[in-house]
Image (tube, helix red, strand yellow):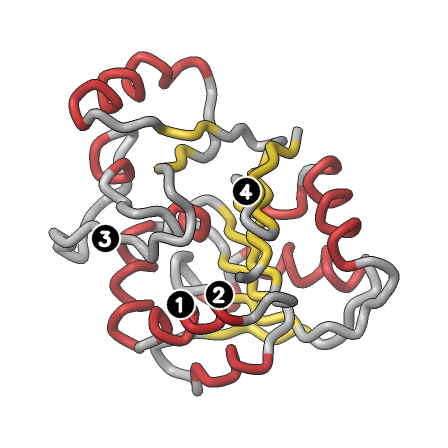
Amino acid sequence: MATLLLTSTGISSDVVRESFLQEIGAYRNQKISIITNAAKEGNENKYARLAEQQFRDLGFSSISFVDVETEQIHILDDADIIYVIGGNTFTLLKKIRASGADKILSKRLSKTSDLIYIGVSAGSILLTPTVRLANEVEPDPNDEGIDDFSGLSFFPDEIYPHYTEDVESEIREYEIRHSVSVRRITNDEAILVKNGNVTNVS
């Protein structure tokens, strides 16, 4: 299975960036694909451009943006690092499903041990069993009319990114309502999944 780095803000956090660098070692020749479909403006979204610049600052040069709606999604087959930026969880889920990118991601995540997947906010929620949390706690607009909240299920627990104590009571009510446990991650934290082991990065 691929290595997963599930974050709120990608590699903007110093501690998360260091965890990523430890995973890739000294080489910078990996191909990076940045999936932009959760964000308004797509490739021109400021967070997409920020991610590109952050990778370039770290010495990477092979970086491509991927709009799964309009581009050849099989570019994902060649990626060494798949980076899924945040935005609207339901927009991301709908476009990933409609394009068939969900099948490519599922195949690669399950079978490619040297792949690194970095999820940012909605990109992290995508890998959980359900994105229902995004519909009920500080909800994203569900303008896509999504009623099947199934995620890709590569991480067993639900995730709440951008966690602050202000939303704790709402999350606890959600946990009780659905008899689930939610993993909370702040903007400076991440969850690292490698070889079946789960580590909190903070």
Q: Earlier in the sequence, mark 4 or mark 1?
A: 4
Q: Which residue is mark 4?
A: 7
Q: Is residue 87 visible?
A: no
Q: In 3D space, how far apart are the residues under numbered discs 2 and 3 (Cα atoms)?
A: 17 Å
Q: Amino acid at mark 2?
A: Leu
Left or right for 133, reference 155:
left
Residue holding disc 1 = 106
Q: Considering only order in the chain, which callout, 4 or 2, is on the residue closer to the N terminus?
A: 4
**Secondary-structure class at tag 3:** loop
Q: Is 105 situated left or right of 60 in this image?
A: left
In the orientation shown, which residue stands out farthest toward the front?
A: 196
Q: Which residue is mark 2?
A: 109
Task: Identify the residue at horizontal 46%, vertical 26% (top origin).
Answer: 163
Q: In the image shown, does 145 or 190 lie closer to the viewer?
A: 190
Tag in front: 2 or 4: 2
Amino acid type indicated by mark 4? Thr
Check disc 1 and give the amino acid type: Ser
Which SS class for mark 1? helix
Circle 4 crowding by C-alpha within 10 Å: few under 14, some 14–19, many from 20: many
Write down the quadrant of residue 28 in the picture.
Answer: bottom right
Quarter of the figure with the C terminus: top right
Q: Which mark is residue 150?
A: 3
Q: Of the two numbered discs 2 and 3 on the same chain, state the one appearing first in sequence.
A: 2
- Residue drawn at point x = 50 percent, y = 55 percent: 85
- What distance separates the C-alpha of mark 4 from that of mark 1? 19 Å
- The quarter of the displayed image where residue 32 is located: bottom right
